[in-house]
Image (cartoon, rainbow, N blue to C red):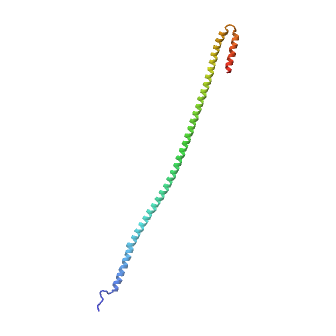
Amino acid sequence: MQSLDIISVNLWQILISLANLTILFLLLKKFLYKPVTKMLEARRAEIDSQYSDAQNAKQSAEAKDAELTERLVGAKAEAESIINEAADIAKARGDKIVEDARATADGIRRQAEEDARLERKRMNETIKEEIVEVSTALAEKMLEREVNADDHKALIDDFIDKIGEN
């Protein structure tokens, strides 16, 4: 039969290979695994920090948004209050202007009525005087010398009183 030199198992070579592998593993673990692990942990911490900062920024932005929304609602309410107050003031001023205009119009109307009353009275007096003059002239013509001056004056006064009663 043939010899199996090609497939032979050399125990010493296997043990040396295992020892080399163990030494290589320990060296890699000591010099490579720990620094890589530290670097990965640092990177993980940095990423966590960035996520935390982003979350804090998001919360801060939401808080500012809520605050601005609240302030906007407050500003709208204040603006509406100011508008309502201005409308009330304008209405009050308008009412006062209308009231003043009515009072002025009433004063003008009363003055016009008073002027008309005084004018009527003056016209009545003027008409009475003209009637007296015409009556006197007519009576003089009719009576010429039959009535003396005192009777004549009494007749005129009686006539004027009757006209004044009407």
Quarter holding the N terminus?
A: bottom left
Residue 134 is left or right of residue 2, and the answer is right
Residue 88 is left or right of residue 4, and the answer is right
Q: Residue furthest bottom?
A: 1
Q: How far from the left and from the top, in percent, is residue 72?
A: 50, 51
Q: Nearer the viewer, residue 1 or 88?
A: 88
Asked if residue 134 is positioned above or below residue 76 in the image, the reply reads: above
Kindly identify the residue that appears in the image at 68 percent across and 16 percent down: 159
Quarter holding the C terminus?
A: top right
Asked if residue 157 is positioned above or below residue 10 in the image, the reply reads: above
Q: Residue furthest left?
A: 2
Q: How far from the left and from the top, in percent, is residue 84?
A: 55, 44
Kindly identify the residue that appears in the image at 34 percent across and 81 percent down: 17
Q: Nearer the viewer, residue 52 or 89?
A: 89
Asked if residue 41 is positioned above or below residue 73 in the image, the reply reads: below
Kindly identify the residue that appears in the image at 41 percent across and 68 percent down: 40
Kindly identify the residue that appears in the image at 69 percent across and 18 percent down: 162
